[in-house]
């Protein structure tokens, strides 16, 4: 059976460093990895950058005369039908591309993608899933920003989505699912956490109970679910703490000639450690629960992150992991189960 052709649409105008870093990352994905890329954005700016990279005429550009800025949200995404993220979604919806990559405003990307692509059958709300560099193996955390106030039924769906995602991307045969809370006991946490615990315990997933914040990087679970507000705060806190730790270690090992000499045999390991904790290594976060593949990149992303996000989008679209759990999700879609 021939390999599925995957074409990735890239929102060239989304992100703090757009369009320069976005175009650079997309060009690297096309040039170094053979991806079929279509850039969506203000044509004169995008083509000027392509000329600088020496690939004008080799990467397709679809014009978009509007953009949604980083401080804008869902309403702007709905109103601006000619924005780069809206047109990128339309390319995916019409089959002209099989995946979308955007570093734009998260709320705008989620709103545009949900409205224009639609959720998969049975899915109440989408969730953004990220991979964290935990020990002894990586872990999936969701939601980190798509749905700030989910219901317990939505958290059950997030667990199903995360289980399928961890199985396909991390190779975990039977992922352990944890619920982020403030204590290990089922009665700990706010009302959502307490209700969700009972729902998850009855769900068709390998639920291992509550996971505290201090256990996130310790491999307590393969998939951890939470609401989008909490998940986003946790993700950014972890990213900041890891950057701080890596910087402090590097400074300590280079502050004195003797320390620099002692660190020489460990340079390779230190570089690997820094790379492991660098969000750009993982590229982007998958927006799960939609009918098509969407990858959201950190707003401050540089070219390397965009390249890796394009690779992730290609892999997800090629495997169909985004739509795998739908048969399991449909029975849970009607309404919130009653309180327990």
Image (spheres, rainbow, N blue to C red):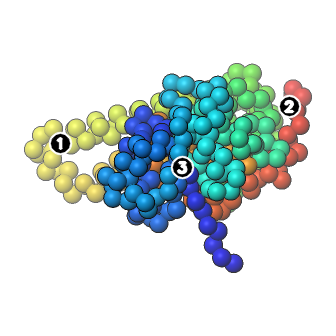
Identify the residue at horizontal 46%, vertical 58% (top origin): 59
Tell me if 20 is positioned left or right of 134 in this view.
left
**As displayed, is residue 180 above or below residue 162?**
above
Disc 3: which residue: 62
Where is residue 126 shown, x and y percent of the image?
70, 39
Quarter occupied by residue 335: top right
Q: Is residue 57 above or below residue 121?
A: below
Secondary structure beneath label 2: loop
Q: CA distance from mark 3 to mark 2?
A: 42 Å
Q: Element type at marker 3?
A: strand
Q: Of the residues under marks 3 and 2, which one precedes in the sequence?
A: 3
Q: Residue at x 49, y 29 (%)?
A: 70
* Drawn side of residue 91 relative to residue 51, left or right: right
Q: Marks 3 and 1, Cα distance to the nearest angstrom? A: 47 Å
Query: Does the residue at mark 3 contact the one at mark 1 (Cβ under 8 Å)?
Result: no
- Name the residue that disc number 1 marks: 254
């Amino acid at each position: 059976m021939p390999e599925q052709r995957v074409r990735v649409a890239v929102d060239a105008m989304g992100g703090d460093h757009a369009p320069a870093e976005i175009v650079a990352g997309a060009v690297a994905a096309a040039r170094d990895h053979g991806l079929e890329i279509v850039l969506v954005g203000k044509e004169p700016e995008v083509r000027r950058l392509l000329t600088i990279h020496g690939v004008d005429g080799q990467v397709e550009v679809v014009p978009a005369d509007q953009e949604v800025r980083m401080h804008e949200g869902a309403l702007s995404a709905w109103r601006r039908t000619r924005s780069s993220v809206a047109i990128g979604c339309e390319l995916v919806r019409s089959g002209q591309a099989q995946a979308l990559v955007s570093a734009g405003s998260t709320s705008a990307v989620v709103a545009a993608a949900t409205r224009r692509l639609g959720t998969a059958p049975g899915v109440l709300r989408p969730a953004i899933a990220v991979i964290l560099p935990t020990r002894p193996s990586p872990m999936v955390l969701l939601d980190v920003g798509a749905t700030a106030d989910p219901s317990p039924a939505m958290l059950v769906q997030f667990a199903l989505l995360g289980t399928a995602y961890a199985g396909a991307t991390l190779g975990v045969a039977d992922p352990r699912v944890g619920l982020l809370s403030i204590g290990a006991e089922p009665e700990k946490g706010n009302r959502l956490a307490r209700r969700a615990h009972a729902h998850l315990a009855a769900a068709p997933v390998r639920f291992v109970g509550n996971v505290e914040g201090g256990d996130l990087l310790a491999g307590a679970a393969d998939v951890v679910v939470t609401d989008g507000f909490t998940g986003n705060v946790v993700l950014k806190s972890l990213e900041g703490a890891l950057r701080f730790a890596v910087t402090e270690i590097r400074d300590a090992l280079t502050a004195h000639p003797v320390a620099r000499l002692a660190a020489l045999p460990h340079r390779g390991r230190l570089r690997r450690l820094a790379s492991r904790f660098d969000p750009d290594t993982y590229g982007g976060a998958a927006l799960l629960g939609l009918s098509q593949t969407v990858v959201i990149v950190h707003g401050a992303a540089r070219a390397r992150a965009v390249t890796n996000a394009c690779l992730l989008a290609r892999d997800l679209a090629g495997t169909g992991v985004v739509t795998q759990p739908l048969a399991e999700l449909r029975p849970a879609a009607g309404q919130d189960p009653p309180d327990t």
